[in-house]
């Protein structure tokens, strides 16, 4: 179920990327404090990529991600990376350590692969919500109604519907 939810969000991202020109993808947006849709997309991808590449060692450090500029300037490169990541999502759960630096102190916090996938999924939805803000309806970009909306919010809306 978790993998399917991530695959769904990746499909939403792929649909968006296929609709944007490279120029629009890279365009700074006032609503995003000058960031571009490409920068937010890169950020989503690189957190998943970081988890994927650090899985074998068992120590995940999201601050030590690649920050590949191509992912924020070339929608096709982002599509290709999303596709590669999707193929590698379905791994066995295992204990991991999240390596974080706080106040100059490096800490290792116990976690696991599925928990980090869930974190990345929630993080993806958060950045999708920001991307949605950057895309006024008049631009003609089609997004699903769930793009950038948390699962819990979608469920709540169903309960409130007449």
Image: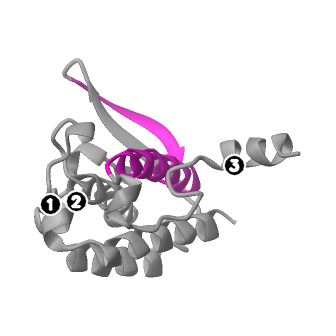
Within 10 Å of the Cα at label 1, are there few (<14), some (14-19), or many (20+) other Cα atoms?
Answer: some
Q: Quadrant of residue 83?
A: bottom left
Within 10 Å of the Cα at label 3, are there few (<14), some (14-19), or many (20+) other Cα atoms?
Answer: few
Position of 30 relative to 75 (above/below): above
Magenta-drawn segment = 105-134
67 inside magenta stretch: no
Q: Quadrant of residue 18?
A: bottom left
Query: Can the viewer see residue 3 in this picture?
Result: yes
Q: How many marks?
A: 3
Numbered label attached to residue 26: 1
Numbered label attached to residue 11: none
Residue in the image at 23% along x and 80% along y: 76
Position of 144 relative to 123 (above/below): below
Left or right: residue 63 compared with residue 125: left
Return the residue at label 2.
38
Secondary structure of the residue carrying tag 3 is helix
Secondary structure of the residue carrying tag 2 is helix
132 inside magenta stretch: yes
Return the residue at label 3.
154
For the residues bearing labels 1 and 3, Cβ distance under 8 angstroms: no
Residue in the image at 88% along x and 45% along y: 162
């Amino acid at each position: 179920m978790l993998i399917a939810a991530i695959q769904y969000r990746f499909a939403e991202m792929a649909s968006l990327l296929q609709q944007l020109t490279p120029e629009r993808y890279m365009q700074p947006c006032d609503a995003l404090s000058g960031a571009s849709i490409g920068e937010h997309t890169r950020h989503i991808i690189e957190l998943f990529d970081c988890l994927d590449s650090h899985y074998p060692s068992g120590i995940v450090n999201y601050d030590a991600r690649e920050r590949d500029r191509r992912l924020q300037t070339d929608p096709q490169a982002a599509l290709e990376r999303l596709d590669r990541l999707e193929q590698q999502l379905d791994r066995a759960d295992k204990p991991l350590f999240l390596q974080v630096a706080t106040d100059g102190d490096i800490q290792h916090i116990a976690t696991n692969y599925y928990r980090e996938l869930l974190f990345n999924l929630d993080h993806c939805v958060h950045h999708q919500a920001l991307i949605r803000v950057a895309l006024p309806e008049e631009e003609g970009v089609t997004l699903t109604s769930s793009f950038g909306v948390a699962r819990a919010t979608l469920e709540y809306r169903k309960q409130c519907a007449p």
